[in-house]
Structure formats: C-alpha cells, structure tokens
Image: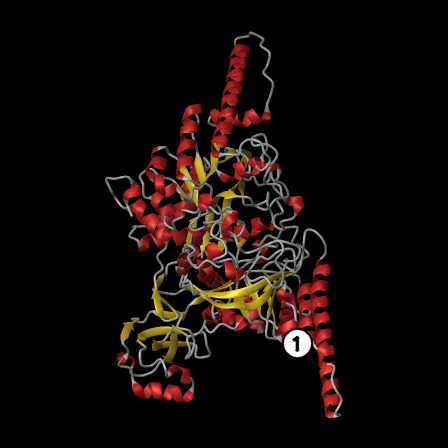
Amino acid sequence: MDILKTIDAEGKWLTPGIIDVHSHLGVYPSPSVESHSDGNEISSPNTSEVWAEHSVWPQDPGFQAARAGGVTTMQILPGSANLFGGRGVTLRNVPSQTTQGMKFPDAPYGLKMACGENPKRVYGGRKVAPSTRMGNMAGYRTAWAEATEYKRAWVKYNKDYAAGKNPTAPERNLTNDTLRGVLDGDILIHNHCYKAEEMAMMIDLGKEFNYHSGTFHHGIEAYKIADTLAENKNCVAMWPDWWGFKMEAFDMVQENVAIVDAVKNSCAIVHSDSSTTIQRLNQEAGKVMYRAQEIGFALKEEDAIRWITSNPAKALGLSDKTGSLEVGKNADLVLWNQNPFSVYAKAEQVFIDGAKVYDRFDEKYQAVSDFMLGQPSVNQPMSSGK
Amino acid sequence: MKLLKPFIFVLACTSASAFYPSIVNAETLAITNATIYTATDQGVLTNATVIIENGKIIAVNADNADNADTVIDAKGQILTPGLIGSMNKLGLVEVGAVSRTRDGGDEKADITFDASIGFNPRSTLIPYARKGGITSNVVVPSGGKSIFKGKTFAVDLTGRFESITASNNAIFVDLGAKSKGSRAYDMQQLINKLEDAQKKLDKAKKKLAKEKKAKKDGKKSDKKEDKEPEDLKRDELIINAILAGTQPLVVYSDRATDILALIKLKKRFGINIIIREAADAVLVMNQLVQADIPVLIKAMRNLPGSFDSLHTSLNSAAILTAAGVKVGLLSTDAHNLYQLRFDAGNAVANGLSKEQALASVTANIADMFGLNSGAIAVGKNADLVLWSADPFELSSRVVKMWIGGDEFTTQSRHDALRKRYTTNSDMPRAYTK
C-alpha cells in the first residue's frame, strides 16, 4: 500500500476515538435558551414515538468542544422525564448543517427509558400516573403488554399476507413501532436507572417481555449488584463522582466503575451526560482508575481506556465498527500529547473515519459553529480595548 | 513542651504577643523535609519545615524543628495550604432534590438573611470535600426574590459544631440576564440603594458638622432628632458597612456591560466588590485591573451557555491572571467541591502556572473574603495538606491534612459503602459494617 502521509507520534499516546454513550448535545445545546430546549417531550409518560434526532441542533458549539476532547462518536438521548423518553441517535462528531450528515451509518437506535424519581416526580406533580415507583413499573408493563399485542398483530398480518390471505393491515402506531423494534432486537434499551433494586427489576422486566434490558445509565448503585449486571450482560454507564443531587444518587462510591468492571463479562462505561465533562472523558476515566488503584485494584491505562471506547461501542451495538484500534475498524483515532489519564493531557489530533477533524495546532482543523461565527472565538477571546 | 525557647522569644518580640499566654500548654507540630508551596511571595520552598502551635503556623523554615513535640517527615512530598471552596451551599443542602434538606434560601430572604444559622457541620458532604484537600469554604445563600441574596459566611471543614469562622463576610447580589424582567431594573435597584444610603450619610455628616459648629458657637443642639446607630434598621447598617468599604459585595455578573457598571459603582461609592462568574471579564480586564476588582470564575466554563457568556474559555484564568486581575476559582457545587484541585490542574493545562493556580484556590480567595488562611506563612491558620504527588493531578491524593492544626481524615460515608460491597462475607452485606 502507498503511505500518503506519516505523522511522527514519538512520545505521544494514540487511542481509539472517545465514545460517549450518554449526551444531550444538540437537544440541550449552548446557549441554553428556551427555543433550543428540545430534549424532554414532557407530555406523556410514554413518548416512544419521539426521536432525539428530530431535536438535534447541529450548530451546538458543544460538538466542537467535545471534538477537541477526542470525542468521535456519541449517542444523543432524550431526557429522563418519561418512562419511555423516545429514541436516541448515535452521531459521528463531524460538523454538518444537518443531523443526517452526522448520523452514524447503520447504527442501531436506542430507546431511552427512565427509572425512579424523575418520571414519578414529573407526572405525580400533575396528579397523573406514575406518581410512585410501583406506578413506574405498572407504566412499563402496560406499555410492553400493548407492544407485544401490536407485534403479534403485525406478525400475523405479515404471515397472512405472505400466505396470500389478503388480510387487513393493523393500524400503524408510532409509539408501538419503537417498542416493537426493541422486542425484535433492532433497538437497544438505554435505561436511566440509579438504584440497585430498580436495575434488578428492569432486568426482570426485560425477561418478562422477552427483550434485553440493555445498558443502565447513571447506575450510581451498580457496585451493589455488579455480579447480577454481568450475569445478565448489562452494560452500565456511570460517572466517576457525581452524587447527592437526588436521593437516588446518594450512595455514590468513587470506585463504582472499577467494581463493576472487575466482574467477569462485565461492561463498565464512563459517560458524561454533560456538555462540560464530555470534553474530558479521559480525565473522568482517569479519576476512577487512580482511586481504584489506591485501594488495590490492578487497573492500568489499557483497562481504563475501554470504559470510554470499546465498552460504549458495545453498548451502542457498534463493536464491529469502532471503539478499538483493530484492522478493519473505522479509523477513529485520538493523538494525545501525553498519557491521556492526566489532568494536563490534551488531544492534539482527532480523526474520524480516517479524516482529520481536529488539530490543536492548526486552525484549519478547528471547526467553528455558525452560532459563534462573527463572535470572538471561544478559544481566542477579543483583547481589551479593540 | 520542649520547644526551642530562643525561637519563640524572637517571634514574640517581632510579631504576636498573643502567642505568649498559650505557650505553656501548647503542643507543637513540625512538618519537616517538605516541598512547600507557600502561596505567598516566598514561592516554593524545598526541604522546608513548618511549625504549628495553637492552630497557627508559628514558623516557616525555622531551625530546631526537631525539638517540636511531634515531628512529621514529609519525605519531600508537597505541602500546600488547604484549598478554599467558595460560592456553594455546603452545609445548607444534603440532597439537592430533598426540599427539607435545603436551607440556602427563603422567598422572603433579603439583604439581612443569615443562612449561617442553618449551617449543618455534620453534613456528609464535608468529609467528602476533604478528599480534595479542602479545609475551608465560603458558603453563599441562594436567598429569595430580592437581588440581595443575603450574607456569605466562612466555615472550616472540621465538621465540628464550631465550624463557622465568619458569619458575615460579604453580601451576595445576583445581577445579569433574567427570564422575567430586565437586568437594568436590578442594577438600578442596587444603584438606588447605595445612592439613597449615601445621601442619608452625607446629610447626617453635614448635620453633625453643623452641630459641632453650633456647639462651638455656644448654641443648643436639637439632639432629639439625631438618629443613633442603634436606631438604624438592620439593612441600613449593612448598606452603611458596604459604603464604608468594610462589607464587600460579591456580585454575580457575566456580561461586560454589567461588569463595567459595577466598576463605575466602585469608583463612585468606594465600595469593595468581588465579581463572581464574570464570563466576559476578558473583554474588560484592563478596567478590572485599574479598579482593583477581583473575580471568581469557573475554570471549566468554556461554552457559550447564554448570550451573556460568549467570551469565556478554558484560558480565561490564565489570560486574566496575566493581565493582573486577581482570580479565584469557583466551586459552586457543594457535592463536587473536592474536584476543585482538578479545576486548578485544568487551568494549569490552559496556561496558568502551578503557583498561580494554587493561589487561585487558596490565597486569592482568602484575600477576597478576609480569611486568615490560604497561605503558609507565620500567623496563618494551620490549614495544611500533604500530598502524595502533584496536588492538581488525577493520580495524587491527600496523605495527611490539618485544619487549625488538628489532623483530619478524608474518609467519608462513601468509603464505608465501598468497603461494605468489596469485603467478602458469608452473611448479607448489611452485617458488614
């Protein structure tokens, strides 16, 4: 093969592109103005019919900032107000005027579900169901029972149609279309769920209705049931240290990710859920690695990097395409100036599908959102008096 | 008590005679062989020694440290002043979404609101914050509808019932963009309040001068109408203290126009102002330097979160510091207060020197709020942290820490939970304690 260009990376670190499995960039963009607050369709506890990609504002300056932090792929999810928040979309972090221009080709859709305090607070406050955790559970079960009937009707229709029976098609229902996608294994569950007992119930819920309970997001108490999560092949996306903002986030431990990771067949992920920390997922993973090392976990950089690359790729159903440096995978790469698990580390060059999308030392490769154009740039503030 | 008498003698003569009475019973602690980041003009001292007595630093780099009651060999590790948190609700909130654990605000709260009365030193957030080497903190109330949110107060992180070190070190004012109404109205309220109070003071001053003159001329004064200070309302006393420059205002403000308006206010009334957040500060940094106004900024705030904050970047701390603005790094989230050292590290990654970064989380904040901490110097509170390595790095940790000379642990409820779930037992977890 012909080598067109050679980059001397002596002394630098090369990692797979960083993947954030939980982001609201574009649906809760900067500036955070009412007109762009498009992440939570708080109008019914089941809004499986909405798709986050229909809310994404591709000009969110947060995409550029995340790219400078080495993020090449991210799942944009609806918020957590509803039991079923709607479909998430996996995006490449490439600048584009359209959301279609950012979509990860052939990535499976996600379905955002939410346990616990948020749905019961939002709807309980309106004196409609759910207003309790048991109400949450009843809401999921009712929806899955209906979706199961919906699927059955369509399967029967397709069968009869194939048999030349000229059947009448069931009525199309967008909400149940999404849920059926889950029952068929085409759409992956991404479940906002903090507490041990709730995650365990959501695993059982999947078994009851014959779908996989997917990836738990936020998973503050995952360390309490690390074995159960690994046995059931659930990925868990976690913060290194956020806590205390809700009762369900009170039992945080800084080693959560490492404890989940230590079990065989586990799938531990560090996620951001933030336009700020998505820029430093390397540091977020680093915090966990060092805290766990202090208490005797034999973790190394090659372990910690999986939490922000190959494990989120797995959770997104993209293991065959990205998340590791292997022959045949998409060339999603980050070149770091040093060990990326340092507070001083910086991504110097970022590549998506082999194309350079960011270069710290070359303005040509520093994209600027339309919104910031004509404003003094984020990184180059106007000097005083000019 | 086997401390070096000659040294104490010298100290007593040169500075504080206040050390004298306590000498008899005081235990002394010496930390030797440390790499000391002083957060003073002394910079970094290697193979250095600090001696602590009665909760205060009584010597830096003195001889005879071996004579202290306790000697700790730092083995070259880094010793810094304890970090200082600011502008958060530490001790005023336990769980954000649990309303009955929130005591930072009240609809009717005004300029006189003293949230320190509700401070809880037993909060689980406090030992957790110590993991980040935080030894003291400036708590801010969220107040009520008024732009005047109430009094900020300083606490140490001992967790003791006597944690409050200053119940009133600034008045917090919230200005800038709002979803209902105009920023102009809020700014006007602040201006009017100061203007009206100044008028009253001027009037009283004139009257006093007149009376003095009258007395001199042998005439009777009409004392009945004189308002004694005790007759002033609580809010009037506060405004007068602000006008006297003894009570600082800490003002939330982002947009350059608001910052310039505050600079004007300082010039006009001679008040003491600290600007919090100051997203646009880089646009008016020379004016800030001229007006000698310090800023408290968020190190990681680089997105245009609003139309008031289009000019904030990861470099802001470095740019402002280089221009001569005194910068403190904010830590507005009480639960994540421990992360302040990583914020400082990121500021270093974006242009600040390590010493400047340390000052921005210690001495600079102490200066703004008049705290006797934040630096390793004689007479300062012995709030000290010994680090395993670079305090700003993700990989380092607190080895030992002292608050007011007493050693404190960094263990918290979080460690108890982690231990429970990582300890093997043939009984249910609930029996592992």
Closest to the observer, A112 or A99? A112
The amino acid beneath tag 1 is: Glu
Viewer-closest of B260 and A122? A122
Please name the residue that numbered disc 1 is placed on.
B228
- In the foreground, A131 or A265: A131
Position of residue B320 relative to residue B100, above or below, is below
Q: In the image shown, does A307 or B378 lie closer to the viewer?
A: B378
Q: Position of residue B375 (x, y in %)?
A: 44, 74
- For mark 1, give the secondary structure: loop
* Residue B346 at x, y percent in the picture: 48, 61
- Residue at 43 percent of width and 86 percent of height: B15
Image position, residue A222 (x, y; %): 39, 41
Residue depicted at 39% across the width and 65% down the height = B390
Res. A345 in view: no
Q: In the image, what residue occupies the spot 46% across and 79% down?
A: B41
Q: Residue at x 28, y 72 (%)?
A: B73
Quarter of the image with the N terminus of chain B is bottom left
Q: Residue furthest left?
A: B426
Dividing the picture into quadrants, the one containing residue B182 is bottom right
Number of numbered discs overlaid on the protein picture: 1
- Percent position of residue A141, x then y: 48, 26
Q: In this view, which residue lies farthest toward the bottom?
A: B217
Report the residue that reaches farthest toward the top: A165
Residue B359 to residue A163: above or below = below
Q: Is residue B324 visible?
A: yes
Position of residue B345 relative to residue B433, above or below, is below
Locate residue A201: give its quadrant.
Answer: top left
Mark 1 surroundings: few (<14), some (14-19) or many (≥20) residues within 10 A: few
Please state the chain letter of the residue tagged with numbered disc 1 in the rendered image: B
